[in-house]
Amino acid sequence: MNLVNAVVQGVLLGGLYALLAAGLSLIFGVMRLVNLAHGAFAVTAAYGSLTLVQHLGWHPLMTLAVVVPVFAAAGFGLQRGVLTRAATRGPLTPLLVTFGLAVIVESLLLTGFSADSRTLPTGQLSVASVRLTGTVSVGVLPLLTFAVGVVAVLGLQWFLFRTPAGRLMRATSDDREAARIVGADDRRVFATATAIALGLVAVAGVFIGMRGTFAPSSGAGVLLFAFETVVIGGLGSLWGTLAGGVLLGVAQLLGAAIDPAAGVLAGHVVFLVVLAVRPEGLFPKAVIA
Amino acid sequence: MTPLLEISGLAKRFGKLTVIDDLSFTVAPGEALGVVGPNGAGKSTMLNLVNGVLRPDEGTIRFAGTDVTRIGADRRCRAGIGRSYQIPRPFGEMTVFGNALVGATLGAGLRGRHAHRAAFEALERTELMSLANSPAGALRLLDRKRLELARAMACGPRLILLDEIAGGLTDSELPTLVDTVRGLRDSGVAVIWIEHIVHALLAVVDRLMCLTYGTMLAIGDPQAVMRDPEVVTAYLGHTVERAS
């Protein structure tokens, strides 16, 4: 029954990956911009949360109330101040700019927090679990993470397709000039999209910190998993992101169940197979715009 | 009566090429101004300057008493300048209704029920109601042109800029479109309409302007402008030459 357990835990892990990748998917879907600092931002959010936990004695979940708005505001500023200008100089410039940001952020974290691995203390939450069958039980924290991931994807989907602001975002993403001539402030729309994406990545970062360990250098690995999730699911597709996260999570934990060292490798193999067989991803049709 | 749109000394250059050269004219509220001129005369550039997609090198644009020369296209739309493109640019993944709704919420600044009503009204006036739920990307040319018009109308403009909306349509499709534009003008919206199909234009416009190489050749009574010897050589003359 070890395999059933691996699948269940993998699905739950997939929720975290979906949460992590949702912001990456949104930025790409709306602005056709690949944010290479995504992983570094997630790790920064975890450190931000850790600082609040240490100094104020808050529970990590409570720190979301501060970390998320701060990241959203930073995202708005980042888009308006840096990325909009970078995007006017061709598709390569934003790549270089966000890569540079990732390097800067990692160096700053290293200076401020040292290279030690840290984790966010969750108290009772880390050991609480629900028994499903005799051999399968799921932790409350993974379950909560999964729920948050699903809610994030559903919420984003609802926002984009059911609200006036979402409609505006899709229109601007589709044809920027046409959106401008019907009254859309395209720079503000893009800044809002980045704000939402960074708010989401902050949530993801805090959950990563609660579920495991993180260090200043963790950003690259986090970015890789987010990328694999997005590519497996189909670039710019939110449902695909959810499916991609679940597939990646299941692959990693099934791999680990067979051989503890093979978990991450199994995830990479699934990613490569999808890339080779179905390079457009599982749900390429459901684009944001 | 104070003019709705007041263009004075407008100039636009692309590198060394002067596309618009010292152009001045006014449009009164509710007036329909037709624009003719050979290809490359700067007609579309002029519309891009009026609605703010391009910034002029010289001159000022005043709309409803305010200087709008330095403000962006989005704000000019919200101020009441609507625009339809020569080559329709619908938001392809959205429905026809969704396209109109974007205009109503953004351009006209309406919310909820009011936005829906404005969007429906725009579709009704352009006879697109039956296609309201179709994806905009799948429309045929006439309906794409209508949607272009509907989206601009949903923004609640006081001035609407039409760029060759009759181009590419068949003779049987033309009258409905002409009726729509006339209805728009009759409801009090000022119109600047660029069109090569002169008889469609003459059926609606109050005044006609002829543009060549970025300068105004003539403006005034449509019939008089079409008879103007300079207009005949510069514009119609070319057509005759090419035809022969």
Image: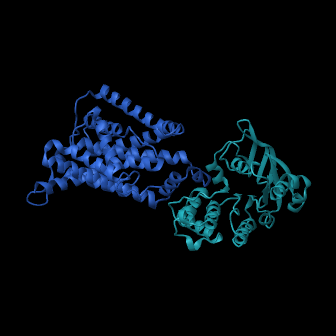
In cyan, which chain? B
Q: Where is residue A26 in the image (x, y as percent from the top left)?
A: 41, 49
Seen from the viewer's position, the closer of residues A225 and B25 is A225
Give the residue at x 52% y 46%: A188
Count every numbered label the image shows and give the total: 0
Is A216 on the left or on the right of B48, as rendered?
left
In the image: residue A128, left or right of residue B194: left
Q: Can residue B58 be seen in this view?
A: no
Which image quarter holds the N terminus of chain B?
bottom right
Residue at coordinates 57% horizontally, 59% vertically from top-left? B90
Quarter holding the C terminus of chain B is bottom right
Q: Is residue B53 visible?
A: yes
**Residue at 53% across, 52% down:** A172
Say which of B104 and B87 sits in front: B87
Image height check: is B10 above or below A240?
A: above
Q: State the colouring used for the structure image.
A: by chain
Q: In which quarter of the image is residue B99?
A: bottom right
Q: Chain letter for blue, please.
A: A
Q: Is residue A229 left or right of residue A166?
A: left
How far from the left and from the top, in percent, is residue A262?
17, 43
Q: Position of residue B85 (x, y in %)?
A: 65, 56
Q: Residue furthest front?
A: B244
Q: In this view, does B196 lie to the left or right of A21?
A: right
- Up the image or down, A115 lies above or below B18; here it is above
Q: Quadrant of residue B59?
A: top right
Q: Nearer the viewer, residue A84 or A57?
A: A84
- Rendered position, A109 above or below B47: above
Check the image and report above or below for A109 versus B81: above
